[in-house]
Image (spheres, rainbow, N blue to C red):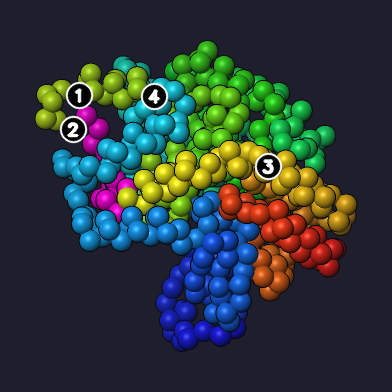
Amino acid sequence: MSHHLTQAQLDAHWMAYTGNRQFKQDPRIITSAAGHYYTDSDGRKIFDGLSGLWTCGLGHSVPAINEAVAQQVKTLDYSPAFQFGHEKSFLLAEQITEFMPAGLNRIFFTGSGSESVDTALKIARAYWRKKGMGTKTKFIGRAKGYHGAGISGFSVGGIPANRTLYGQGLESYHLPHTQVPGSEFSKGMAEHGKERAEDLLNLIMMHDASNIAAVIVEPMSGSAGVIVPPKGYLKRLREICDQHNILLIFDEVITAFGRMGAKTGAEAFGVTPDVITMAKQVTNGVIPMGAVAFKQEIYETFMDNGGPDYMLEVPHGYTYSAHPIACAAALASLDEIKKQGLIERVSHMSSAWENSVHQLKDASPIITDIRNYGFAAGITIAPIDGEPAKRPFQIAMAMWEKGYYVRYGADTIQLAPPFTTEHAEIDSLINALGDTIRQQG
């Protein structure tokens, strides 16, 4: 591959979530992006089959976002995040509430999805202390869940490879995942698996609700390979949390702002949590930004118990909370989603996407499951003995050589094309993937 990096330059960068040794032997360097395509250092066009990292549903180099960022840089590049404000953060907060379920109308800004999760968990603990229930400190996550790369995120997360290296995290317990025998190759929400929500009752019995602050789950688990909730599962979690006075947090870093063919995963699946974390699509990936939406009652608990009005109600925040340039990008991104009707488009195109993806079922015996919802799909690949992650890696690398970027993770291939993807691009992507998997089998 053609690039101009020296070995010393390659060695200097310790890359995130990357097999550094393999990458630096054969670097895959992206030089530009526009529309649905990347360009690599050999000048090849690469179809973006994951919308960046679940981030760029509008595609790349969107003129309205580019212009908003350029104007903001020239006007106000940075504003202190503590004790002072700028107009765009308030405009954006109100804009975000229009995408949230009714009642989740207080927005706290962060710099990433990981920071959003950390914020949600900290506020959950602090909320119960403000309510006089300071023993409620434990968290319940879920097997195969992903909640970012911070200590709190890996603690409540349930992907073993993201946990085992780091030792003890926060005190957390985990529900089982919802991939049950008999649910393989379900189109959309599976009929089986709702009963796994009942395991929450067992954890409550073991640890007592008086010690549990919150349950945190992704409405649809993305990084584990598009694990879609079974019918009735999220509703049952909501019922149990209500019965036992436990907060329910939806991690919507992947699912918010259109990916599910709805404003949020909460809307798509018809269940309203107490807290929603978000990032990624809020700025279309252009500038790092995250946020957390809280129910008004949570916010008011802090305001009503904050002491003198000049005191900090919550001593928490980040240098880059509500960064002016990020706010400008987010306002433009959300405006484009609305103006172009992209949530409705994803909803309309989802059936075609579903049919195309499930055509892979008989492509190869190494495909053991396919899952989908909205504009997302996960394909489980049978492992090679002793090397469970090797085949997905080989498939993703072969797809890159063919001109398609897809994500590999554990035993899965993951797909999430831009919201504006055309039928012909879907067919091209799926046909190439089917051929590639057959070659691996």
Q: Residue at x 27, y 58 (%)?
A: 71
Q: Which residue is mark 4?
A: 295
Kind of residue at disc 2: Leu
Disc 3 versus disc 4: distance between alpha carbons?
A: 30 Å
x and y percentages locating residue 102 in the rendered image: 44, 23
Q: Quadrant of the N terminus?
A: bottom right
Q: Nearer the viewer, mark 3 or mark 1?
A: 3
Does residue 255 sit above or below 424 in this rendering? above
Which residue is denoted by mark 2 in the rendering? 312
Q: Which amino acid type is shown beneath numbered disc 4?
A: Lys
Q: At numbered mark 3, what does the secondary structure look like: helix, strand or loop? A: helix
Tell me residue 315's x, y (percent): 23, 36
Q: Is residue 324 magenta?
A: yes
Query: In the image, is residue 284 part of the stretch drawn in magenta?
Result: no
Q: Residues within 10 Å of mark 4 (few under 14, many from 20)?
A: some
Where residue 81 appears, as percent x and y from the top left, is 22, 46
